[in-house]
């Protein structure tokens, strides 16, 4: 089996707990703790060609370890590489492990291992070892080295093996190695590389065990925060490319065996080449998943595996799933009963069925049986009530008017409270009370009134087991609440039994006071924490959450976890709402399955998966119950077919909206219903039907359509939709495969291209008769609501058709709704810490602030992630039109790897700015700007660039429709970064008067002059222009003449626009000729722009409010 590490899809990644859990084969909680307890400052982020990297380890001299260590010789059960037969392991009670392969367990070998350990980590205060002569005999090299380093030897009792903590460490280390063999099927004789590698992973893995409380064993030992950067790129025995001679050799295939010891500062890795003899290489790169899928590489991998198998003479063990057959590993498992018991022992509750039972019923009002907390005149706080029935007038007609919007729904209902009191309430009042008492996910929160009961279940801690005695004789209480429950009465009048741990977490002070009042403070489940809580009462009250969130309800509606529970809820409520939701989903999804009546053993090449129902309540659809059948695609192997599915670019959307207005075309948008289910399944998958299939439950079903959750479903649907669009005469453009075009003619004879834009299942049609285009798609796909409409929202942004000052219709794009939600989320998070967004933010940055000069404290891991999340939110806001914060976000983005608290405060300042000025939108104005031709000088370039001509795509379609002009403003701020002294490039590019491309980016090199930075900006702008001209031509859009570039630097303007201008600074010769040749070829022409009117100044300089508003008002509204 190939290793499945978190980097099997790509070479590098930002490390998440899920990533680390997979590559180190540890639990998700341990991965989270490890990332919190370590640094990753030097994680590789290169995506460039294969090259060597350098160590970031700091040098330190051996030091004294204020702890006790232990050592023992481990028998790996087989001979290792390089003649190694044993492994000397050093460890302690905190599960620290260091492993050193040795040729034998005697004399100088063990002394060398001790020497290496002291050099690597330091000399401990004492060393526990067993009674072996090589470790205890007077005059032995091992004892002499202990004496020289002032380490006190402690001999363990031969009849008490548990006295030596290293026994436990070796047992755990052996388990990790055996797990690797089972999981990856690597040769066993590689233990001489594997055991040191996994020992290192044990050192730097955080845990709550052994009294570490979230620390790493290495961190506890050295008193420092370890950095794990070097261990993030590769998993044990991963396929890698390596070069024996950096930059001069052809990459070869090998397997990763660990980080090699090296005296130099070059990062070195141990690699297993095809020869089977491990080597050290400094130039190593992961074999990505996509690379493994090519036929050429598949052959290389097969050849490599065959040669390695022949070299080590170990038969590959067949597996069924992830569990190998016991008899195949009998010789190995017989030597380690602990691991055999752990690996093959399965805990299976026979009382829990594998599938839910069958069902039956029908549907009514979505408000009935809803639970709410509502105010009453005779009560001091909200009371819990239940909607019992709909009220009717004397004719039997419902009172009030129904509406899909809950706040406009005025039907009257009878609400019965827990004390029997009944009250009439309208639907909108019910909804209002509901919203006031749920979180953002619709979960009801409960306010504690009192604690009224305590009980213990079997297995709860008793007085006899209340204490634990450590090996050094220290007696302390067991810290557990297992098996204990308390009864709570909530403010809404309801009472529930809750796990003691949950109430302790949400209401520790109230629970502690209850324990004291009822004489429970000496109970083992209370005694270990109640005294501390009472002592720190005031501090805890201020910090703890005062709400207990109920997970079983959403918007006051009980949400089931299974089909059986859904039917029970319907039966209790006397309706069929959940059943109808399930029936609707199964009606849509059932055609995706085909019954298989044969022997499943004959399904060669098929993989079995589980399917389950996800239940939800849709707030925006009048509390409609929803069920969704989802496939467990995460359990399947990666399919051989491509799984990538592209979407239309935002730049293409802006171009399309501009062309629609320019050619006076209409736009319709639609959403394809059950999109994935319309496409055939590309994988061989089968499942056993669950109770959601009704009478077909238990049957074997072949999956024939692309289910939600399968890896290949996105690509399968895209291919199916692409075929449909192609069948109605559209062809994908080569500049953007999700923009489709087809020649069309208006009734007045005007020729143009109709366009279709596709973003997964969202489709936009642009035509003078877009309804005909939609009908072609609707003939194959069912649309949501069976309709297509003029779009109001697209990709999170608000779209609206308006008229400009010349009464020309044009489309606009706004991020107002998106930002309103984003700002609300930020404010809610700040409110939890008794903070709020800054006010009176007239510009994105505080006055005089620059990110590179910020010296505030570095954020912790949680803060870094939140900072990165907010940057992502604001980047999308920029894509939706808020280009007025582009420069500030670009500057802050350069600190994504290690942001400081001051950087985060400036992000809050930007949100404060957006809150105070929320209504800026981009206008995609098709009108042609009025530009004087006198600004552009014409010259004969033949003597300088005789053959200069624009390369036109040979396969571009014939241009149709009205022509467009390209205008581009560019600027650079020289050495604006106060630390690196790199310059910032700003580019703002228009089609006619529509802003299409906006960029603010730090330059890659340091320029010594303003001239150099401006010339670099000119080169970057021309590259963007060339790319845009290609895209427009491949869209079939006529381009009028050269693009107009506006530059405010006199020297750059003259060097580029005038043939006679001579370059004095030869280091800029490449940019010089690149730009001049573009002018000579008629691709661009350059005009001198005054600094006061250069719009791209917005993207290079932090401006005052007045200056910003002056420039923004020229192209934003």
Image (cartoon, helix red, strand yellow):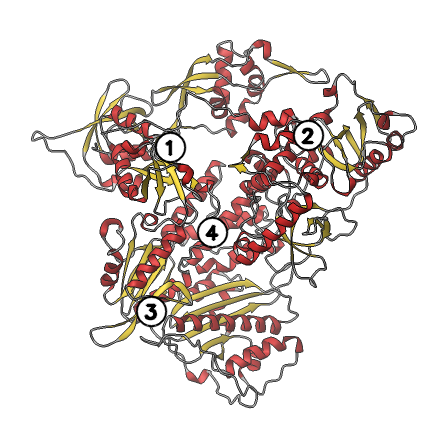
Q: Is residue 531 or residue 991 the one in the foreground?
A: 991
- State which quadrant residue 944 falls in: bottom right
Residue receiving disc 2: 95
**Quadrant location, the N terminus:** top right
Say what secondary structure mark 4 lies in: loop
Q: Which mark is residue 443?
A: 1
Q: Earlier in the sequence, mark 3 or mark 4?
A: 4
Q: Is residue 1022 or residue 598 the one in the foreground?
A: 598
Asked whether disc 1 touches disc 4, contact meaning CB atoms under 8 Å apart, the reply is no
Badge 3, how many Cα within 10 Å: few under 14, some, many 20+?
Answer: many
Q: Earlier in the sequence, mark 2 or mark 1?
A: 2
Asked whether disc 2 touches disc 1, contact meaning CB atoms under 8 Å apart, the reply is no
Q: CA distance from mark 2 to mark 4?
A: 42 Å
Q: Earlier in the sequence, mark 1 or mark 4?
A: 1
- State which quadrant residue 366 falls in: top left
Say what secondary structure mark 1 lies in: loop
Task: Judge depth for marks 3 and 2 and give the one in front.
Answer: 2
> Residue at the spot x=51%, y=79% of the render?
1078
Q: Which mark is residue 659?
A: 3
Asked whether disc 2 touches disc 4, contact meaning CB atoms under 8 Å apart, the reply is no
Asked whether, in this view, residue 1084 is left or right of residue 111, the answer is left
Q: CA distance from mark 3 to mark 1?
A: 46 Å
Badge 1, how many Cα within 10 Å: few under 14, some, many 20+?
Answer: many
Where is residue 1073 shown, x and y percent of the image?
A: 58, 79
Q: CA distance from mark 1 to mark 4?
A: 41 Å
Task: Judge depth for marks 2 and 1 and give the one in front.
Answer: 2
Task: Judge depth for marks 2 and 4 and give the one in front.
Answer: 4
Residue receiving disc 4: 640
| Count of picture labels | 4
């Amino acid at each position: 089996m190939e290793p499945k590490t978190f980097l099997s899809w790509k070479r590098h990644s930002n490390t998440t707990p899920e990533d680390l859990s997979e590559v180190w084969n540890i639990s998700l909680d341990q991965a989270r703790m490890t990332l919190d307890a370590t640094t990753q400052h030097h994680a590789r982020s290169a995506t460039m060609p294969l090259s060597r990297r350098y160590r970031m380890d700091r040098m330190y001299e051996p030091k004294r370890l204020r702890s006790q260590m232990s050592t023992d010789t481990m028998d790996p059960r087989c001979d290792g590489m390089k003649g190694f037969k044993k492994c000397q392991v050093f460890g302690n009670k905190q599960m620290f492990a260091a492993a050193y392969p040795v040729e034998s367990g005697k004399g100088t070998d063990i002394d060398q291992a001790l020497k290496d350990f002291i050099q690597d980590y330091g000399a401990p205060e004492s060393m526990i070892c067993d009674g072996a002569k090589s470790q205890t005999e007077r005059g032995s090299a091992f004892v002499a080295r202990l004496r020289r380093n002032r380490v006190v030897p402690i001999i363990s009792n031969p009849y008490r093996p548990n006295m030596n903590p290293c026994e436990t460490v070796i047992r755990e280390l052996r388990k990790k190695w055996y797990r690797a063999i089972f999981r990856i099927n690597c040769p066993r004789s590689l233990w001489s590389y594997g055991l040191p590698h996994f020992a290192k992973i044990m050192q730097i893995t955080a845990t709550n065990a052994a009294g570490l409380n979230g620390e790493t064993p290495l961190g506890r030992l050295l008193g420092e925060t370890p950095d794990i950067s070097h261990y993030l790129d590769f998993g044990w025995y991963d396929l890698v490319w390596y070069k024996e001679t950096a930059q001069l050799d052809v990459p070869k295939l090998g397997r990763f065996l660990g980080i090699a010891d090296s005296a130099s500062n070059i990062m070195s890795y141990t690699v297993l080449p095809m020869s089977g003899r491990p080597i050290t290489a400094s130039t190593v790169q992961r074999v990505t998943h996509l690379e493994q899928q090519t036929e050429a590489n598949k052959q290389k991998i097969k050849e490599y595996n065959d040669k390695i198998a022949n070299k080590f003479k170990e038969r590959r063990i067949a597996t069924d799933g992830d569990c190998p057959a016991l008899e195949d590993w009998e010789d190995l498992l017989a030597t380690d009963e602990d691991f055999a018991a752990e690996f093959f022992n399965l805990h299976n509750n026979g009382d829990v069925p594998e599938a839910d039972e069958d069902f039956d019923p029908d549907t009514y009002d979505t408000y009935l049986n809803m639970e709410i907390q509502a105010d009453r005149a005779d009560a001091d706080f909200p009371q819990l009530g239940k909607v019992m029935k709909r009220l009717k007038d004397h004719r039997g007609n419902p009172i009030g008017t129904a509406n899909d919007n809950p706040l406009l729904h005025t039907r009257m209902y009878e609400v019965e409270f827990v004390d029997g009191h009944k009250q009439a309430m309208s639907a909108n009042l019910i909804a209002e009370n509901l919203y006031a008492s749920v979180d953002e996910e619709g979960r009801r929160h409960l306010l504690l009134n009192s604690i009224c009961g305590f009980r213990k279940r079997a297995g709860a801690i008793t007085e006899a087991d209340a204490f634990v005695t450590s090996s050094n004789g220290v007696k302390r209480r067991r810290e557990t609440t297992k098996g204990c429950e308390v009864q709570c009465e909530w403010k809404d009048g309801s009472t529930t039994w809750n796990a003691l741990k949950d109430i302790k977490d949400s209401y520790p002070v109230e629970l502690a006071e209850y324990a004291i009042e009822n004489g429970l403070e000496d109970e083992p489940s209370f005694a270990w924490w109640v005294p501390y809580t009472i002592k720190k009462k005031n501090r805890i009250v201020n910090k703890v959450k005062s709400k207990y969130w109920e997970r079983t309800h959403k918007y006051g509606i009980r949400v089931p976890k299974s089909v059986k529970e859904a039917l029970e809820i319907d039966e209790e409520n006397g309706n069929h709402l959940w059943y109808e939701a399930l029936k609707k989903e199964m009606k849509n999804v059932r055609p995706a399955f085909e019954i298989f009546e044969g022997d499943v053993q004959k399904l060669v090449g098929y993989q079995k998966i589980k399917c389950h129902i996800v239940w939800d309540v849709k707030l925006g659809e009048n509390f409609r119950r929803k069920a969704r059948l989802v496939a467990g695609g995460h359990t399947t192997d990666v399919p051989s077919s491509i799984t990538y599915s592209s979407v239309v670019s935002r730049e293409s959307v802006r171009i399309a909206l501009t062309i629609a207005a320019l050619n006076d075309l209409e736009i319709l948008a639609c959403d394809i219903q059950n999109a994935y289910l319309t496409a055939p399944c590309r994988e061989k998958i089968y499942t056993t039907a669950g109770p959601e299939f009704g009478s077909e439950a238990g049957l074997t079903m072949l999956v024939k359509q692309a289910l939600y959750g399968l890896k290949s479903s996105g690509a399968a649907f895209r291919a199916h939709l692409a075929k449909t669009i192609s069948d109605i005469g559209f062809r994908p453009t080569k500049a953007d495969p999700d923009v489709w075009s087809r020649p069309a003619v208006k009734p007045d004879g005007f020729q143009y291209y109709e366009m279709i834009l596709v973003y997964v299942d969202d489709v936009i049609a642009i035509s003078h008769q877009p309804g005909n285009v939609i009908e072609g798609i609707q003939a194959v796909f069912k649309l949501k609501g069976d309709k297509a409409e003029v779009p109001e929202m697209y990709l999170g942004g608000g779209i609206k058709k308006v008229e400009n000052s010349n009464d020309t219709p044009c489309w606009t794009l706004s991020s107002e709704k998106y930002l309103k939600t984003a700002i609300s989320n930020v404010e809610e998070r700040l409110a939890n810490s008794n903070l709020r967004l800054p006010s009176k933010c007239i510009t994105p940055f505080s006055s005089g602030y620059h990110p590179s000069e910020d010296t505030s404290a570095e954020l912790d891991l949680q803060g870094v992630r939140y900072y990165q999340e907010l940057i992502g939110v604001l980047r999308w806001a920029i894509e939706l039109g808020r280009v007025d914060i582009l420069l500030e976000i670009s500057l802050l983005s350069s600190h994504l790897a290690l942001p400081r608290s001051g950087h985060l405060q400036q992000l809050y300042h930007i949100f404060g700015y957006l809150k105070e000025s929320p209504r800026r939108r981009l206008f995609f104005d098709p009108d042609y700007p009025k530009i004087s031709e006198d600004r552009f000088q014409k010259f004969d370039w033949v003597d300088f660039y005789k053959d200069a001509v624009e390369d036109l795509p040979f396969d571009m379609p014939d241009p149709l429709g009205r022509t467009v002009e390209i205008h581009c403003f560019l600027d650079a701020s020289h050495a604006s970064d106060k630390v690196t002294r790199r310059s910032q490039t700003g580019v703002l590019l228009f089609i006619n008067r529509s802003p299409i491309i906006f960029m603010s980016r730090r330059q890659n090199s340091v320029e010594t002059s303003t001239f150099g930075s401006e010339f670099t900006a000119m080169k970057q702008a021309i590259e963007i222009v060339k790319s845009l001209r290609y895209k427009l031509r491949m869209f079939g859009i006529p381009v009028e003449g050269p693009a107009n570039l506006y530059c405010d630097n006199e020297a750059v303007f003259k060097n580029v626009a005038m043939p006679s201008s001579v370059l004095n600074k030869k280091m800029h010769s490449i940019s010089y000729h690149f730009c001049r040749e573009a002018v000579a070829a008629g691709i661009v022409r350059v005009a001198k722009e005054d600094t006061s009117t250069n719009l791209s100044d917005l993207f290079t300089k932090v401006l005052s409010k007045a200056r910003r508003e002056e420039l923004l008002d020229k192209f934003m509204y």
